[in-house]
Image (cartoon, rainbow, N blue to C red):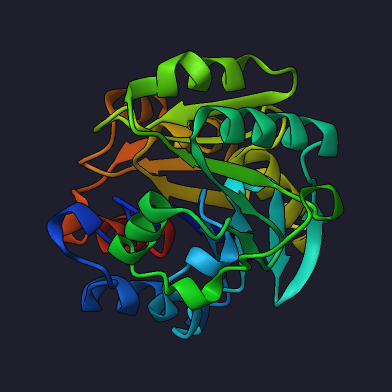
Amino acid sequence: MKKAVFFDIDGTLINMLAGQYTMRPAVRKAIGALREAGHHTFISSGRPYLYLDRDIIESQLFDGYVLMNGALVLLEGEVIHHQPLPKKTVADVVKLCEEHGVEYTLEGLRDIYLPKESPLSEAFTEAIRVPLSSFTRSFDVQAIDVYKMEFIAREDGAGGLFEKFIAYPGLTGVIDKYHAKNMEVYSDTETKATGILHALEALSIPVAESYAFGDGMNDLEMMETVGTGLAMGNAREAVKERATHIVPPVGEDGVATGIYEYILKE
């Protein structure tokens, strides 16, 4: 029976903290072996489409993408599910940001919206190797669909504003674990898990035949939803506790090990 395998990016396929921005050869080969065996492969990420590295998009190793924590699902280039945030909520949050000097980025289906005066955000996007030419710099917040929002402040927690964002009905989010000046906010009903379920339904693949590799807190739901969850050796403890198996860390080609030992071996 055909299987569907979902891969987180950061800390799973690559390791940006260690300067590894592309998939290692052993991982590429293993994912290629999955496809040669007739199985389906997906990226499952909090990133929007424009934040995907060309190495991933042009690799021809993935059938589709679960993006922005499940708010957008693509299969063979077609949108099979999308759920934007309420426009009033987005407008309210943007107003608060502008009043308090907090920079914001608004993520759409294929476009990312960034106000012209955003020096902190520009520096951040350069650090993650996303060219500024990718962004739409002039826009009407009332006229666009937004699926996820990211923020950068000059003080930890934006003076309490980040907590206010999380408290909005229908929203949830995460503050950067390394420093509290960055935050992302998204729907509290759309997760990687719900996105995976949409992909499985479109492919008529039962949940029992689904697998997921991940390491971060936004991977918890998919670990609990797929038939087999595979946590990286470098994963957060909460992720490991919910996984079916633990594979070696990203720097030791854990994805390749998991594919050969737990998917292709079956």
Looking at the rendering, in which quadrant would you find the N terminus? Answer: bottom right
Relative horizontal placement of residue 210, taking residue 177 as reference (left or right): right
Place of residue 148 in the rendered image (x, y in percent of width and height, measured from the top left):
63, 44
Place of residue 221 in the rendered image (x, y in percent of width and height, measured from the top left):
55, 31
The structure residue drawn at horizontal position 59% and vertical position 36%, both measured from the top left corner, is 98
The structure residue drawn at horizontal position 61% and vertical position 56%, both measured from the top left corner, is 66
Relative horizontal placement of residue 167, taking residue 132 as reference (left or right): right
Picture layout, residue 247 above or below residue 156: below
In the image, 48 versus 40, the foreground residue is 48
Looking at the rendering, in which quadrant would you find the C terminus? Answer: bottom left
The structure residue drawn at horizontal position 51% and vertical position 19%, both measured from the top left corner, is 161
Place of residue 257 in the rendered image (x, y in percent of width and height, measured from the top left):
25, 59
Relative horizontal placement of residue 106, taking residue 15 as reference (left or right): right
The structure residue drawn at horizontal position 84% and vertical position 47%, both measured from the top left corner, is 142
In the image, 191 versus 139, the foreground residue is 139
Asked where in the image residue 86 lies, by quadrant, the reply is top right
Relative horizontal placement of residue 227, taking residue 19 as reference (left or right): right
Q: Is residue 1 visible?
A: no
